[in-house]
Image (cartoon, helix red, strand yellow):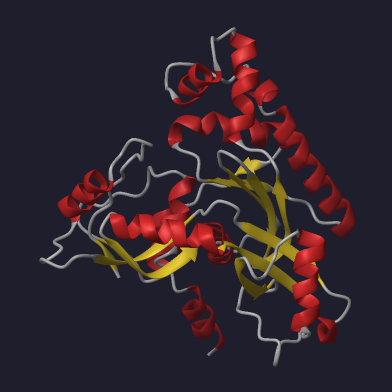
């Protein structure tokens, strides 16, 4: 695969499907067809990624039992959600017939939310021949990057979005922790409004995303609730396993919120994982076209590039 061009379109709530399609038409020739076929990653509302360890591998083979676990432990109704079950040891699809794993990852989102994302893409002229849950795609990319760079210590991954956040701990390709945090960036705006005496939350949000204010000093106070959640998860994990987490990877956030990563890493005493994307992509046989520069791209691009990687081919190549 060759990356011929990279472009970014900052989505606003007022943007029409026609404006978004216009952006795509500047990049690709639709050749008169109604849609541009794509592999797409989405962050649907209500998405979930949950780790579960059954008492035994035999217990994990019982799909009725797993369906009850989803309902009782994770409050997920299998009838209303699209659910995939993965083997937590390597991210492969869980096959109840042949799997010997008792460590599982449930992931998915409400069927309505996936439908809504798909409808939105079609409106913009994008036909997804493959629709992926970006949360999981990105975890796959981080795992593969760590494997490629021979990183032996567990990695804390933090996905922070408007309404929610997710905490993951990945250790040498295995998902050891996957848990939600029931609040996201939106919880910061009232605090920022009070701290600076702003007139409303909308003003606080605008300032938060602007490049005009230095949050270095105020950052720890604004993120205290989040860092407490992260400290609780990492502390419990390290005591439980005897392993030490060295680095943190924060996805999704744009460059102007780099102070969030810095505040989190300082609070937890962890290194920020800054992927060298070029060498990693090269190892996945993804080439960069002339003039395509990836060295200055932030961590949130990991999700996009992870859609391009065929990670299983690397593993198959190594086992030959």
What residue is shown at x 15% (from left), y 63% (from top)?
30
Q: Is residue 186 above or below residue 212?
A: below
Q: Quadrant of the N terminus?
A: bottom left
Camera sees residue 239: yes
Find residue 129 and report its horizontal and vertical position in percent.
36, 72
Q: In the rendered picture of this protein, how many numbered marks are placed on residues?
A: 0
87 vs 82, nearest the viewer:
82
15 vs 224, nearest the viewer:
15
Residue 162 falls in which quadrant of the image? Answer: top right
Q: Is residue 261 above or below residue 48?
A: above
Q: For this view, does 187 lie left or right of residue 149?
A: right
Q: Is residue 285 above or below residue 293?
A: below
Residue 16 falls in which quadrant of the image? Answer: top left
Find residue 300 and report its horizontal and vertical position in percent.
47, 47
What residue is shown at x 31% (from left), y 45% (from top)?
8
Q: For this view, does 245 lie left or right of residue 8?
A: right
Q: Residue furthest left?
A: 32
Q: For this view, does 315 lie left or right of residue 165?
A: left
Camera sees residue 101: no
115 vs 164, nearest the viewer:
115
What residue is shown at x 16% (from left), y 50% (from top)?
26
What residue is shown at x 75% (from left), y 67% (from top)?
70
Find residue 156 and report its horizontal and vertical position in percent.
68, 50
Residue 128 falls in which quadrant of the image? Answer: bottom left
Find residue 190 and report its horizontal and vertical position in percent.
63, 21
């Amino acid at each position: 695969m060759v990356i011929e061009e990279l472009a970014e379109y900052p989505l606003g709530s007022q943007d029409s499907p026609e404006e978004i399609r216009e952006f795509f038409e500047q990049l690709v020739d639709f050749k008169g067809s109604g849609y541009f076929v794509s592999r797409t990653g989405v962050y649907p509302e209500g998405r979930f990624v949950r780790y579960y360890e059954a008492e035994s591998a035999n217990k994990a083979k019982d799909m009725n039992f797993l369906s009850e676990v989803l309902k009782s432990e994770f409050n997920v109704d299998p009838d209303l959600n699209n659910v995939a079950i993965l083997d937590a040891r390597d991210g492969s699809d869980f096959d109840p017939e042949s799997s010997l794993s008792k460590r599982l990852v449930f992931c998915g989102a409400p069927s309505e939310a996936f439908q809504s994302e798909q409808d939105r893409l079609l409106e913009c002229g994008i036909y997804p021949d493959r629709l992926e849950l970006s949360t999981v795609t990105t975890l796959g990319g981080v795992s593969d990057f760590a494997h490629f760079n021979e990183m032996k210590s567990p990695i804390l991954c933090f996905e922070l979005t408007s309404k929610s956040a997710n905490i993951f701990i990945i250790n040498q390709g295995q998902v050891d922790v996957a848990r939600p945090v029931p609040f996201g960036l939106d919880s910061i705006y009232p605090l920022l409004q009070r701290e600076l005496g702003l007139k409303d939350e909308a003003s606080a949000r605008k300032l938060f995303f602007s490049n005009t204010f230095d949050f270095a000093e105020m950052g720890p106070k604004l993120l205290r609730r989040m860092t407490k959640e992260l400290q609780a998860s990492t502390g419990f994990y390290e005591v439980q396993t005897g392993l030490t987490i060295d680095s943190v990877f924060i996805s999704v956030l744009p460059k102007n919120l780099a102070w969030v990563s810095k505040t989190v890493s300082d609070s937890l005493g962890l290194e920020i994982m800054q992927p060298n994307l070029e060498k990693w992509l090269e190892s996945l046989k993804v080439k960069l076209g002339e003039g395509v520069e990836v060295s200055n791209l932030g961590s949130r691009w990991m999700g996009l590039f992870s859609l391009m990687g065929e990670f299983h081919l690397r593993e198959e190549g190594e086992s030959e």
